[in-house]
Amino acid sequence: MTVIGIDKMSFFSPQQYIDMVELANARGEEPDKYLIGIGQTQQAVIPPTQDVVTMAANAADEMLTASDRKTITMILFATESGIDNSKSGAVYLQRLLGINPYARTIELKQACYAGTFALMQARDYVTLHPTEKVLVIASDIARYGLNTSGEVTQGGGAVAMLVSANPAIAQINQDSQYLSRDVMDFWRPVYADTARVDGKYSANIYQDFFKAIWMRYKQKTGLDITHFQAFAFHLPFTKMGLKALRDVLPEASEAQQANLMREFEASRVYNKRIGNLYTGSLYLSLYSLLANSATLKAGDHVGMFSYGSGAEGEFYSLTLRPHFKAGLINGQLEELLSNREQLTIAEYEEIFDSQLNGPTDRQLDTQQDTAKFVLSGLENEQRQYICH
């Protein structure tokens, strides 16, 4: 039987960030409320020259070979920060990345969950077409507004995943369990560029969904916590995943509890410093786990909990392949994080209010943006993308 799964992963987030201690001080909060209570240390800042399309292109470009670009026959773009209510972000990527023109280009939306649905569709498609590949993108910008309760859980970036037969990283198993309910914990009206959220309610719904789906998973599969060597969670802020993990830790032995906690810490190394990236948060956590774990090995099972407000959740598993670290770009996140520029809170606030919005033509200064793909402005209500 042909194995189908994630062959490669790549990540991009812009070159600027703020420190959570400085943000806490500026907002009159105790720093530990952000560092421990939320579980965040830094937050990516998205300049006007980057949007979900450019971030997706920058993430994917670094991992795709010329052969990949020829054999990709589908691009699935998951985002809740779309730039157009009609045209898919995926079709921009097809042009920017030089991908085979005979490919489907689709955008998907269901809050933070859509990246998981895209991954499942990619797996099923490649199962039927094992010589083809699917590019899955989860790209988002989390915006709640300055001086709001959600400000500490902002951020942004893009995770790119290539799904293929005989993958390097992990097999996507056919064991998904999912749950949907009409819940008003988070939403973004079409007229707004910032989200509306009931933070405490949303965190409670997240935990409720995890417990309900985990129970169903055990009932349907006959598997339990002893089957897993690690869990990866959707991490809009990292304390949320920690609370969910603690809900099920009593099911494990003391030794396994210690192992699962160690792997969880590995899974949130990068999320702590990037912040929230909605559809990509679970997959940045997976990337962090694979890159930072010193003990995971081929054949190990990773439990994956995906959640999107509104609400939809899913739990499924991955089985790690013999050379799973080879599917990651060596040193990518470490280099990205070490080369970032720290902004003052005043500089961050100015950038936050300078995003490209509305129908007015505008030319952006791209000289300070070191990324390969940038947004240069708006002309005749059309976004202008260039390659440096």
Image (spheres, rainbow, N blue to C red):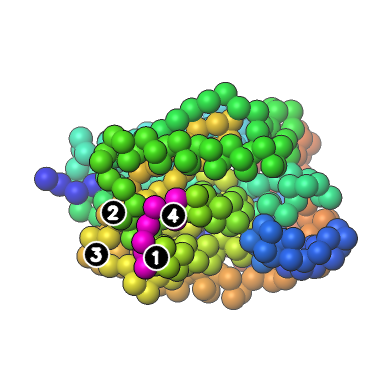
**Along the viewing direction, whichever of 120 and 66 lies nearer the viewer:** 120
Amino acid marked by disc 3: Ala
For mark 3, give the secondary structure. loop
Amino acid marked by disc 4: Pro
Is 272 rendered above or below residue 80? below
Task: Name the magenta segment's main secondary structure.
Answer: helix
* Mark 1 and mark 3: Cα distance apart in space: 23 Å
The residue indicated by pointer 2 is 227
Position in image of residue 48 (x %, y %): 71, 51
Quarter residue 79 falls in: top right
Amino acid marked by disc 2: His
In the image, farthest residue toward the top: 182
* Mark 3 and mark 4: Cα distance apart in space: 26 Å
Q: Earlier in the sequence, mark 2 or mark 4?
A: 2
Left or right of 175? Residue 363 is: right
Question: For the residues carrying marks 1 and 2, which lies nearer the camera in this image?
Answer: 1
Is residue 254 within the magenta segment? yes
Query: Residue 254's mark?
Result: 1
The residue indicated by pointer 3 is 298
Span colored in magenta = 248-256
